[in-house]
């Protein structure tokens, strides 16, 4: 039979190896892709899953085709301008997305244009 002492040593070795494995896994995670792969937009009408790579690779879209104010590869948040700024001439974030996404789908005859095709309930 196994003694209590041997059992305690085996448990401690397992704990040390588990902690070491978790630390190594967390420390050496793969780098984030330069361009996001998929984005999930949360909103009242339902979540919208946007596949970034499909639009850039399959349709050969350039960043500036959708992102109109990129400067020096700096990331920005659409809500900074298209939020509740009080500026009536600036469309809301939702209106800007609808005009950009749905408008492009209608112009090129590709992609969904009905609400429930993009917004998952």
Image (tube, rainbow, N blue to C red):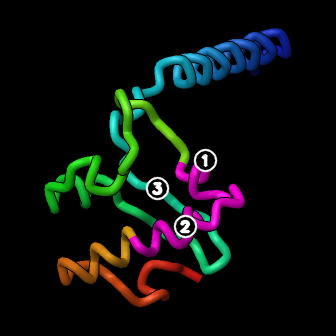
Are the residues flagged by discs 3 and 2 in contact, CB closer than 8 Å?
no
Mark nearer the viewer, 1 or 2:
2
87 within the magenta span:
yes
Using the numbered discs, state the Cα–Cα distance from disc 1 to disc 2 in whole angstroms.
12 Å
Q: Residue visible at 58% across and 57% down?
A: 82
What range of the chain is rendered magenta?
Answer: 78-99
Relative to 82, 33 lies left or right: left
Q: Which mark is residue 80?
A: 1
Q: Is residue 89 above or below residue 116?
A: above
Give the residue number, with chain letter if any, for mark 3.
Answer: 39
| Circle 1 crowding by C-alpha within 10 Å: few under 14, some 14–19, many from 20 | few
Q: Residue visible at 53% across and 51% down?
A: 78
Q: Which mark is residue 95?
A: none
Give the residue number, with chain letter if any, for mark 2.
Answer: 91
Circle 3: element type: strand
Are the residues flagged by discs 3 and 1 in contact, CB closer than 8 Å?
no
Using the numbered discs, state the Cα–Cα distance from disc 3 to disc 1 in whole angstroms.
18 Å
In the rendered image, which quarter is residue 69 located in? top left
Q: Quadrant of the C terminus?
A: bottom right
Q: Quadrant of the N terminus?
A: top right
């Amino acid at each position: 039979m196994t003694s209590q002492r041997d059992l305690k040593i085996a448990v401690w070795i397992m704990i040390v190896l588990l902690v070491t494995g978790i630390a190594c896994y967390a420390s050496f995670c793969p780098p984030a892709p330069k361009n996001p792969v998929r984005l999930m937009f949360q909103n009242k009408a339902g979540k919208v899953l946007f596949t970034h790579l499909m639009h850039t690779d399959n349709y050969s879209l350039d960043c500036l085709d959708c992102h109109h104010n990129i400067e020096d590869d700096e990331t920005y948040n659409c809500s900074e301008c298209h939020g509740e700024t009080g500026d009536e001439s600036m469309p809301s974030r939702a209106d800007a997305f609808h005009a950009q996404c749905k408008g492009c789908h209608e112009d090129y005859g590709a992609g969904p244009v009905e609400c429930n095709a993009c917004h998952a309930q």
